[in-house]
Image (cartoon, coloured by chain):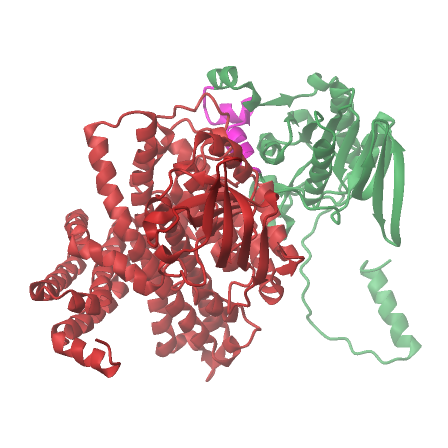
Amino acid sequence: MSFKIVVLAKQVPDTANVTQDAMKEDGTVNRAVLPVIFNPDDLHALEMALSVKDKIKGSEVILLTMGPVRATEIIREALFRGADRGYLLTDRRFAGSDTLATSYALSMAIKKLWPVDLVFTGRQAIDGDTAQVGPQTAEKLGLSQITYAEKLIDIDDSSITIKRRLGRGIEIIKAPLPCLITVNQSAPRCRFRNAKLVMKYKRAASISELQERNEDYYQLFENKPYLKIDEWGVEDINADVNWLGLSGSPTKVKKIENVVFKAKENLILSDNDNDIDNLMKTLINSHIIG
Amino acid sequence: MENFFLDNKSLKFHLNHHLMEKIVRIKEDDFSEKDIYDYAPQDVEDAIDNYEKVLEIIGEIAGEVIANNAEIVDAEGPQLINNEVHYHPATQENYNSLMEADVMGMTLPRKYQGLNFPILPFVMSNEIIARADASFSNIWGLQDCAETINEFASEEIKDQYLPLFSQGKTGAMALTEPDAGSDLQAVQLKATYDEKKEKWYLNGVKRFITNGDADISLVLARSEEGTTDGRGLSLFLYDRSDKAVTVRRIENKMGIHGSPTCELVFKNAPARLIGQRKLGLIKYVMSLMNAARLGVAAQSVGIAEAAYREGYKYALERYQFGKPIIQFPAVYEMLNLMKAKLDGARTLMYETTRFVDIYKGLNYLSEKRPLNQNERDELKKYQKLSEYYTPLVKLFASEYANQVTYDAMQIHGGSGYMKDYPIERLYRDARITNIYEGTSQLQVVAAIRGITNNTFREKLNDYNSQITHPELQNLKSSLIKMTSQYDHVYSKIKDTADQELLDFHARRLVEMMGNIIISYLLLLDTQRDIQYLSSAQTFIKYANAQNTQHAGLITTMDDEDVCACKNNFGIE
């Protein structure tokens, strides 16, 4: 028994270090000016996938991400921690995808990798915070799904048992395989980079990266095929271009504004109903609540 | 995210010294393994990049895990349960994190699953870890045991045990006994050979053994019945899985609480001989001790780095008389000297490590293939430098760690005396560094020979010729003056041909020499990177003043003072 495990991960802007021009006029993220990191929840997902691999020898962990060429970085990060290989979905026609279009693309890529036993991903990404991509991908693939996973309890050749961390307590769930699992930040932290794997994979790269650096990759990949990180475009995953990018995304951002919290004046209220009533009206009218 | 490698630019600076190329080439033997192991480097640049990347991982573990655990480890320490040592759970977490990162066996050959790194990156890892928790650097630093096995044990023992070290088994060196501390020739623990079973057995007691209940221990024992000196001692390997040693107690120490210091009772403990009989102390333990001394130097620099940072931070935050106390001359003067000592100890340490690396590297190479004349000369040269620089750096770094932690606590005032700030722990942890692995007084005994045989003095000429930058000529001329002052003082002592007088002043002479060496090294560092100018200037001025004081004492305190001193205590 051995499993093929896919980890869905995203390279995200480091929202702890956001600057003024973080968003573009059209409401999408201005990636160029932001430092980027491996989405934190996805690192927990990677750890859970690797812990399955530790238990079930011979299993394979594949990192799948969608993004610009730069996102290859997180595939290398995953290789440094024990993933076996990775795929970068990169194509101009993926750009501007919302959660629906993204989960469509990811599900098509997973189909291409089929048969897959397990898919792990973080509960949500720190840029969009929707927590939709995992569940939507499971739906599109017709897989069972377990969300809010905190701990891998047990796994055998046909099922997985997971402890979920919910708002009001915990729940232990057993699901048949194949299955998609979204992992909470309360799950065990991702293991540290492995020294030998870092030395082995530090030169792993996608062809686009090497072309950007003007390096000759033919000999490198000929001698060390494990250094090649594969890139897939729309055709590689047999996707319908109409369901991708802006055209495949029903989510439209109406407006983006910078909100700067600053107390300008104090409002002194008495405890009579009239004052409270007026305050509520003001808050509702200014769309602060409601 | 705290990273104790990335946040300290000096580390990368010392990792990129020009001698590293030579060290890498020797260690990798012309990159003979580049197509055999997927993690072996392709060239010098690739190798140094590997060291940086791996130290970055260790820096992250130090900053994110070990440093956060230091306080609770210090407060609670390890436990003795059924005569076995149990690390504090947080110490165990530290260890597991490093195992997870697969960085054990850093200097071991790849065929034993090691990383095949030179000693320098390993010493650097020790510094990084000691900054986070000095007590944990003891456990980490005992990888030195594996290095000694690799150097002297039979192929059979190496094949069996070295991969275990790479997989994370812990080590200990069991040398000290109740009546054999500084004087290891007095070791009594008995090794007897059972002819029938063709096996060695150990009986006796060891005391003050750091990490005493380790998986694998190197034990110094008397194998030659009837002998009383060092020539009757051999080195043995004891494997804890044989369960023939009990831990009688864990010592209750002033500092380094996380590191269990044990009293061990060997009861017919089966053991394996390392190398040849009778060479235990005179060859193997000397080598092991030298590695351990470098380890203590690294631990000292790590503690000093942590203490300097704590002192600096507090001086910025603490307001008195309406301003942060760093603005008072009494405080910034102290911090400035602390920084100079820290940079000075560190540069001496990495200089020493480079010498050891070249010497040990060539030594290994000589087992694989005959060395050419040039290589043989280099081996000799660097062996000699290693021999005298090692006690010198152990002396300076450990004394500085004490001085820097003392001053850092002083900056904290009353708050620093409370357990509320890390400086209180650092101060206690520093205190052992100039005691164990040979007291400062014993380091002087070893280093003074580098003075009497001119090894240090010749090296000064070499350093002097390397200072070529026109703007450093003023500082250089100060050092030339300090050197002639030293020459004058030393020749005066030498001319008396009075051994006791030399021993009486030995520490002052060694300190004068050390001050000049560190000054030169800081100037050389400044030549490479201007950020060291301030430390160089400060250090040279203080060193000059201290040397003048020492010179005054050496030239005025003669054999009559030595006699008077002895008379005070009724010494013959």
Residue nearest the viewer, comparing A267 with B58:
B58
Tell whether B80 sits left or right of B148: right
Please provide percent x and percent y for residue B355: 29, 44
Q: Which sits in the foreground, B335 or B491?
A: B491
Specify the chain shown as green.
A
Image quarter where the N terminus of chain A lies is: top right
Whether residue B517 sits left or right of residue B205 in the image: it is left
In which image quadrant can residue B148 be found?
Answer: top left
Colour of chain B in the image: red
Magenta segment includes A94: no
Asked whether A202 falls inside the magenta stretch, the response is yes
Residue A144 % position (x, y): 88, 31
In this rendering, position of residue A290 left or right of residue B382:
right
Residue, far right? A273
Q: Quadrant of residue A237?
A: top right
Q: Quadrant of the C terminus of chain A?
A: bottom right
